[in-house]
Image (tube, helix red, strand yellow):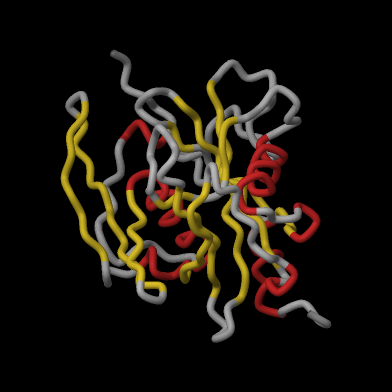
Amino acid sequence: MSEKSQKLLSLAQQLRLYKPPDSLNNPTRRQNGIPRCAKTKTAAVLICIFEGNDGDLRVILTERSSRLSSHSGEVSLPGGKREEGDADDVETALREATEEIGLDPSLVNVVTVLEPFMTKYAMTVVPVVGILFDKKAFNPAPNVNEVETVFDVPLEMFLKDENRREQEKEWMGDKYLLHFFDYQSGSKMYTVWAITASILIRAASVVYQRPPAFLERKPTFWNGNPIKL
């Protein structure tokens, strides 16, 4: 790519100025994520955005390997648990993306870190947003032990009510909706759901600066307020 996309340059400038609403801001959040000294189980995921051939903004996803003992076959963002040598969540997300799909960190321009999500088992998941200016330079090399397929979807789909299903759930008295987004790629249908879908709804809301066209009603604990047993 001889010149960087003006759309991506503008997006990078917009996202560098992003500050989460006070209601979503976690006091442990820093520009590069939660500090390494924080005593919590932490993982980071990479929301890697690029410009598609039609000028739309797209995000890279993976289908987890069927060999994995947990969440096998599910769609997820590249990422994983923080390791001892990781300086911060940015480093965790970039390292995991390299290990899982062969994405060279030098190709990714990290522009912001979104507010953390927390699972009901108190795992903090930090979304790291990066921009891939030169998509052609990325040749996916999935780690067969972890990843079945690398694919991409339009980011804006997570704000639309098309190809979306929902299911009401309850946990510890907290009623919420799980969202399922179906996406056809070639002959294969992928479903993005649970916390991955919620993270991408949030990312799309920030990028496009508008709320989703449906009621989100996410679990209270995903806001970083886990329900105590």
- State the residue at coordinates (42%, 48%): 196
Residue 37 image position (x, y, % from top left): 68, 18
- State the residue at coordinates (47%, 62%): 204
* Residue, far bottom: 54
Q: Nearer the viewer, residue 72 or 125?
A: 72
Quadrant placement of the N terminus: bottom right
Residue 61 image position (x, y, % from top left): 50, 58
* Residue, far top: 229
Q: Is residue 219 left or right of residue 140?
A: left
Q: Does the rendering let one see residue 19?
A: no
Figure check: 200 above or below 119: below
Quadrant placement of the C terminus: top left
Q: In which quarter of the image is residue 87?
A: top right
Q: In which quarter of the image is residue 36?
A: top right
Figure check: 37 above or below 116: above
Q: In this view, does 6 lie to the left or right of 46?
A: right
Figure check: 57 above or below 228: below
Residue 12 image position (x, y, % from top left): 69, 64
Q: Does the rendering let one see residue 81?
A: yes
- State the residue at coordinates (18%, 39%): 169
Image label count: 0
- State the residue at coordinates (64%, 61%): 140
Q: Nearer the viewer, residue 70 or 84?
A: 70
Residue 40 image position (x, y, % from top left): 55, 19
